[in-house]
Structure formats: structure tokens, C-alpha cells
Amino acid sequence: MSIPKLTIIGQIYAKSDQIDFVKSELEKLIDITRAEAGCVQYDLHQDNDNPAHFLFYENWDSRELWQTHMGNQHLKDYMATTEGAVESFTLNEMTRIA
């Protein structure tokens, strides 16, 4: 198994009254993204102590394929649907060292 070229850490904080809604919208992204070219791993997590905090842990074969993912319609739909329901969103592009 080859080492993925790019790891993405995406952190989403839902507004306190929108947690279930944001979670359900994030869950819709999983199967479609896992089927995309270059997606090695795409896992959604929810913080045990702060249910408003979600984290995507992703591995991609290349930055180019991840960029294609970022431009796909299902992500545009997610962004439009959850507008106003998300408190904050951060994204880190990382390279695996070991």
C-alpha cells in the first residue's frame, strides 16, 4: 500500500442549535466522496465532549485530485445548505512524515 500524498484535516463547528442538522449534512458527503478518484480515506468524527465539533480526516493520492473534490457539486450544495448553521470551519493540508 502506498502512502497517500496529502492528508486533510477539516474542522467544523456547528452552531449550538444546528448540531443535528450539520451532522446530517456532513454525513451526506461521505459515500459520494469515498467513491471519488484519489480518495484513500474520508472519515468523519464528532467530539465526545463537544458535539458541535466535527472533524474530517482525509487522505488523497494527490493535491490535484483533492482540488477536484473541492470543486464538486456535492460540496457546493453542502456549503449552500449549511450557510448560517456553521460557526467556524478550518482546513489544514498536511504531509505525512512517518
Image: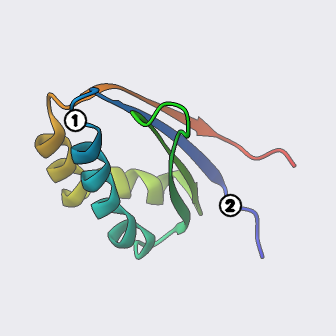
**Residue 64, how many percent across, how many down?**
47, 54
> What is the number of the mark on residue 1?
none
Structural crowding at the residue carrying mark 1, measured as other residues with C-alpha within 10 Å and reported as few (<14), some (14–19) or many (≥20): some
Q: For mark 1, what is the residue? A: 18
The span from disc 1 to disc 2 (Cα, nearest Å) is 33 Å
Structural crowding at the residue carrying mark 2, measured as other residues with C-alpha within 10 Å and reported as few (<14), some (14–19) or many (≥20): some
Query: In the picture provided, is 80 more to the left or to the right than 97?
Result: left
**Residue 38, how many percent across, how many down?**
51, 68
Residue at coordinates 51% horizontally, 61% vertically from top-left? 42
Name the amino acid, label 2.
Pro
Query: In the picture provided, is 67 more to the left or to the right than 45?
Result: left
Rendered view: 65 above or below 7: below
The residue most toward the top is 87
Q: For mark 2, what is the residue? A: 4
Residue 18 quadrant:
top left
Name the amino acid, label 1.
Gln
Query: In the picture provided, is 54 more to the left or to the right than 74?
Result: right
Query: In the picture provided, is 11 more to the left or to the right than 58?
Result: left
**Residue 1, how many percent across, how many down?**
78, 76
Nearer-the-camera pick, 60 or 90: 90
Residue at coordinates 46% horizontally, 60% vertically from top-left? 65
